[in-house]
Image (tube, coloured by chain):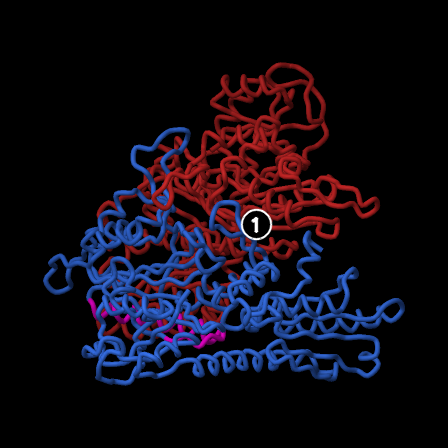
Chain colours: A red, B blue
Amino acid sequence: MAKGSAKDERAVTPQSENFSDWYNDVVLRAQLVDRGPAKGTMVIRPYGYRLWELLQSALDGRIKDTGHENAYFPLFIPESYLKREAEHVEGFSPELAVVTHAGGKELEEPLVVRPTSETIIGEMMAKWIASHRDLPLLLNQWANVVRWELRPRMFLRTTEFLWQEGHTAHVDEADAMRETLQMLDVYVEIARDWAAIPVVPGEKTAGERFAGALRTFTIEGMMRDGKALQSGTSHYMGTNFAKAFDIKYADASSGGQQYCHTTSWGMSTRMIGAIIMAHGDDKGLMLPPKLAPHQVVIVPMGKGDAAGPVLEAVDALVAELKALKVRVHVDDRPQVSMGFKFNDHEMRGVPLRIAIGPRDLENGVAEVARRVTGEKESLPLAGLAAAIPGILDEIQAAMLARATEFRDANIHTVDTWDAFLEATNTGWARVLHCGQPACEDDIKAASAAATPRCIPNDGEPEEGTCIRCNAPAAYGTRVLFGRAY
Amino acid sequence: MAKGSAKDERAVTPQSENFSDWYNDVVLRAQLVDRGPAKGTMVIRPYGYRLWELLQSALDGRIKDTGHENAYFPLFIPESYLKREAEHVEGFSPELAVVTHAGGKELEEPLVVRPTSETIIGEMMAKWIASHRDLPLLLNQWANVVRWELRPRMFLRTTEFLWQEGHTAHVDEADAMRETLQMLDVYVEIARDWAAIPVVPGEKTAGERFAGALRTFTIEGMMRDGKALQSGTSHYMGTNFAKAFDIKYADASSGGQQYCHTTSWGMSTRMIGAIIMAHGDDKGLMLPPKLAPHQVVIVPMGKGDAAGPVLEAVDALVAELKALKVRVHVDDRPQVSMGFKFNDHEMRGVPLRIAIGPRDLENGVAEVARRVTGEKESLPLAGLAAAIPGILDEIQAAMLARATEFRDANIHTVDTWDAFLEATNTGWARVLHCGQPACEDDIKAASAAATPRCIPNDGEPEEGTCIRCNAPAAYGTRVLFGRAY
């Protein structure tokens, strides 16, 4: 047991009491992270990192399937690069970490630690692209980035975080927009099919756009406290960065020089925060089987003479499960009680727990408990391994269904300000809005900080007047508002 | 074609003329890297990054097989941490990049951008380890690190590089040394079985140890110019870092507090430099099939009406090869000549090239050319795909044999100073040495900068006098000296 084990056994703060304390308790006690020494940094512990690796592997596969290649660009960006795109530097300046000294000397030009890599990648794209035959240029990188955070939260807002950032260049707007929406779809798919989170894809309003983008798309996930978490974004930059970095190509027909249209899109370790808050309960984490480091934990029971045969049965089951590529972990710690182990696996969100004791063995059964429903059943040991992949699929589906039901129960289509306040207190409001930034600010101030999350991509056409100011509604469809992380 | 294609077609500088220019020509023209804007940084382009991903995947598999878990620690380390281990700070101080400003303010304590992570991981280990039951603690991280370089070389010495760094804590010296040597073995295996480089594993002399280590082990590869490249290192730290960071555990028997014995070990993007220089020739790169991004390139030939049936045959072959998990690439660029393509694939080191033209198709054959030998053969199209994995294995073995032959031909066991000079001019010298740092310095100054590369692990026992100063030889075996990168 690690230091502080006495404290670890204490239950977490209930979600209903204080969701934020619940979150902090869970990330630390499930050993996903620890606090780093520098302000706002986190250490991602093995259990948390394995979750990230599994997510990464799924997403990397989709990024490659869609024709992108991974590359790696430098961490340090000359300060002057940031300044070339006016909105970009304005957006990121307050969050920059700056290297002023290196190799024992003061640098002639300070180096910025990348907060995102549009600028340095733009500089290289300009060098690599000459002709329309070089397009589209489809790049991605897995990297750490740094954004100085005043109010850090583990996974959600940390000074340093891990992510992938895709950067692509295209001949025209149509091709760049196809890319922007394609990658948004990939994020929807990863969230839904791997993380069991039914995110809502849509476009950000002007005030919430990425610094330097013409259009920003997002996937918004609903957390168990009804707040929204932006869990991935995809941006169409138009020719903003192409002009700032001189990314041009010779046209196929005329041979004339044209600016490229660029995109960027990213998903980060923040997604782990989404998984924690979209599924967890007062017992702790609840991990979707497809991303769980341990999909199954087996707890052998029985002492003395009875232990041997149980361990043999467990070994056989483990071998069968491994052959089926199930990620299985055996908890045979001698120094801790069954009760502690069960609580620990619940805290760590293991989807399926199998307990086998001497009496089970006599009866040829095992006790199988599902984290998502709490349901326990006694299943025959014969054929158990073969049944597990199917049970894991059921759990994955049950988690998505549970999250979808919760999301749908907490999105309300409303047309009065009172109903808006009520809806955004517990979830999201689907409303008509004028689209004016001043009105967005007014709504934020007059409510418990509700902001426009997105204009859903699949919204029904609808006209009318703004929920707040009665001016004519913009966008031709309803907007989702909610409190957000 | 990218900008500068005219220049790309020019042959590289011959190795015999200037090896260093050859290297620079190859890394740029094979599109492995480009220069980054900040001094000494590199952009790893998709072809180079894919090579790294394949190496990473092989090494990560072995790291996990041997019981280690991946984690991630912060990039920024408080400056004070570095100072806690005296030798460590002395070794790394001159190379540090320092963040002094962040979020628009000057920081109270400057943050160092990690040059390596012993200190920050030591701090966390102290928090996580309480009892002997927490040991061994076996961690690894994949990360970028920064060391300010005065004379940067792509892959070999760059201001920022990518690597894995393993960090482990153990109950005693015996267990920590077992770990240190186990990971050295893993590096030998990766170099030999994946990169086709027959490295020599051994211990560094005192002067070449890692800053803060009691013992440093290395794998040394021989490059085609006879120089050595240190390609991976594994360190036994004793209790140096445990004392600096208070990493202690309660003993199993007495319950008393004991310091842990720690290790660290790393392999980096430098290994790509090893692959380039251990195998390349005047035509460019020569990649071992197991790490080649494209193991096979297929070049369809024929124009007009003849093109269709050739492309159909190529498609069928590609489908079969993909089913066999062969990494195959089709070069159907219409705008470049066959000659250009062939040169380009040789430059990029593709192990196997298959050319199919209309006449080949009539005869039911394809021309298959091996990069390592230059050998071309006409093979029947029927059954060709099935034969490819075997041919790739042959190429992998041939590359290891070629590198081993070259290495063995260029290591000389010598006993006179003149013979030493001759041996270290073209390769390495296997000599008896007194082990005195002053004598090492003298040898370096009196030769073309020959330094002790390692005391090979498998050296025969031998006593005698020093090659340079005639004092009694140390180590009980011969030492390898050579010029090094």
The picture quadrant where one finds residue B281 is: bottom right
Residue nearer the viewer, A402 or B236: B236
**Above or below, B404 relative to A405:** below
Seen as rendered, the residue at the extreme right is B305
The picture quadrant where one finds residue B309 is: bottom right
Residue type for callout 1: Ile
Who's the residue at 41% across and 29% down the image? B104
A327 displayed left or right of B456: right
Magenta region: B173-200
A446 displayed left or right of A159: right
Mark 1 residue crowding within 10 angstroms, few (<14) / some (14–19) / many (20+): many
Residue nearer the viewer, A112 or A185: A112
Residue B196 within the magenta-colored segment of the rendering: yes
Instruction: Give the x, y percent position of residue B115.
Output: 36, 51
Instruction: Give the x, y percent position of residue B345.
Output: 66, 68
**Above or below, B25 relative to A344:** below
B338 displayed left or right of A83: right
Main secondary-structure element of the magenta-colored stretch: helix
Quarter the C terminus of chain B occupies: bottom left
Who's the residue at 26% across and 49% down the image? B123
What's the chain of the residue with tag 1?
A
| Residue highlighted by disc 1 | A190
Residue nearer the viewer, A418 or A219: A219
Residue A227 within the magenta-colored segment of the rendering: no
Does the image show residue B132? no
Q: Secondary structure at mark 1?
A: helix
Quarter the N terminus of chain B occupies: bottom right
Instruction: Give the x, y percent position of residue A258.
Output: 74, 40
Instruction: Give the x, y percent position of residue A151.
Output: 39, 31
**Above or below, A36 relative to A52:** above
Does the image show residue B4? yes
Residue nearer the viewer, A39 or A383: A39
